[in-house]
Image (cartoon, grey):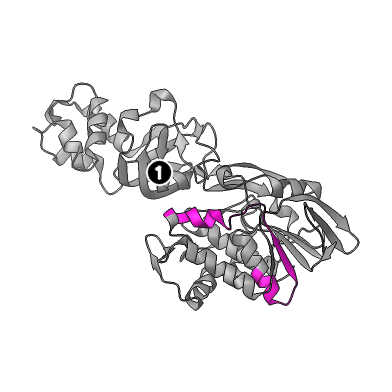
Amino acid sequence: MQTTDVVVIGAGAAGMMCAATAGARGRLVTLIDHSEKLAEKIRISGGGRCNFTNLDARPECYLSQNPHYCKSALAQYTQHDFIKLVQKHGLGFHEKTLGQLFCDDGSQAIIDMLKAEVDAAGVVWRMGTGVFGIERSASGFVVRTAAETWQCEALVIASGGLSIPQIGATAFGYEVAKQFGLAIVPTTPALVPLTFQPHDLWEELAGVAIEDAVVSCGKTRFREAILLTHRGVSGPAILQISSYWLPGQPISVDFMPEVDAAEFLATASRDALLSTVLAEVLPRRLAQAIAAEFGEVKPLKQYGAKQLAQLTERLKRWQVIPSGTVGYKKAEVTRGGVDTRGLDSRTMMAKSVQGLFFIGEVVDVTGWLGGYNFQWAWSSGFVAGGHA
């Protein structure tokens, strides 16, 4: 039996932030992860560049059954606090688009920075160590692994969600929550490509990107690029809307948000082929496909008012009901998780279990695409580390 003050399970973004913060307070901390490789999700993020936060991070950019839950943590540790940490370690970064900050030196530099913070706090590492049992004890918790048993006052679950199982994602955190009587908001893949029924597919257009489009679902809309795929659609705008989409709901796409389609068609060359006219504002292959939907492609002047009205609707409000998503394997995060109604927003601790904390993706807090989920990891990890 080994004794420590805090055991953190999960050495990803939230777990390392929590361990470093708790250790810096003078707490004895043990950080356990079942993987041999450290922070794989950070490593692959942002195409290897790590979109580590967003300048615009705010509570409105997060989904949860309790939209107010994230407010306290985001206020206690902001994106500007994490930027200061990056600067302290001398790492360069740049803003790409929409407030997204990327590390100039790549994802590994962010991992090395966090590891250095954990090491400086005197944290005990246990990588490649599976947890086989957790029990309540008179003084806290008993955590059993294959080689050791740890007695601790505080236990922090930072084991992530179900997204990207190929790098080790499991349901461990949800199982711990259930063991201690906490509710789970049903989980689904989020920030994930959407699939279509065969009759809605444009397989021949796979790979075509529309750099500026507006995708809507209900009252929610995002304006970014979309990408046509062999199975449906992807790209930033689609990933964003996927977090809001529910099975059976339609999504709507405006292919030319800067253009008044009716006016554009009314002022275009009447002698030009419809496909040629559309190619002025759309990728050529997409322009040809849309034109072909209206029968034999012919000069614009040969289309009647009714057809042009239908075309305008097609360009500005194309509606389709996705058949589903491509699943957790391609999802960036998990929507749903440990119900925040059972957690204290000021500390991340379970209201009914003294000393038990849940942070990061395992909790029912899901951010937008673009560094928001990492900021939730930093913020929730910092807050739990300050109280565990």
> Mark 1 = which residue?
215
Under tag 1, what secondary structure?
Answer: strand
Q: Which residues are magenta?
A: 20-47
Q: Residue furthest left?
A: 271
Quarter of the image where one finds residue 93: bottom left
Identify whether 109 is placed above or below 238.
below
Question: Can I make out residue 211 in this image?
Answer: yes
Quadrant housing the C terminus? bottom right
Residue 210 in magenta stretch: no
- Does the magenta run of residues contain 40? yes
Residue 307 image offset from top left, x and y in percent: 24, 27
Amino acid identity at mark 1: Val
Q: Work out whether residue 156 or residue 354 is closer to the camera in this orientation and state it.
A: 156
Residue in the picture at 79% in, 59% down: 351
- Which of the pair 140/217 is nearer the observer? 140
Spot occupied by residue 342 in the image (x, y as percentages of width and height): 75, 54
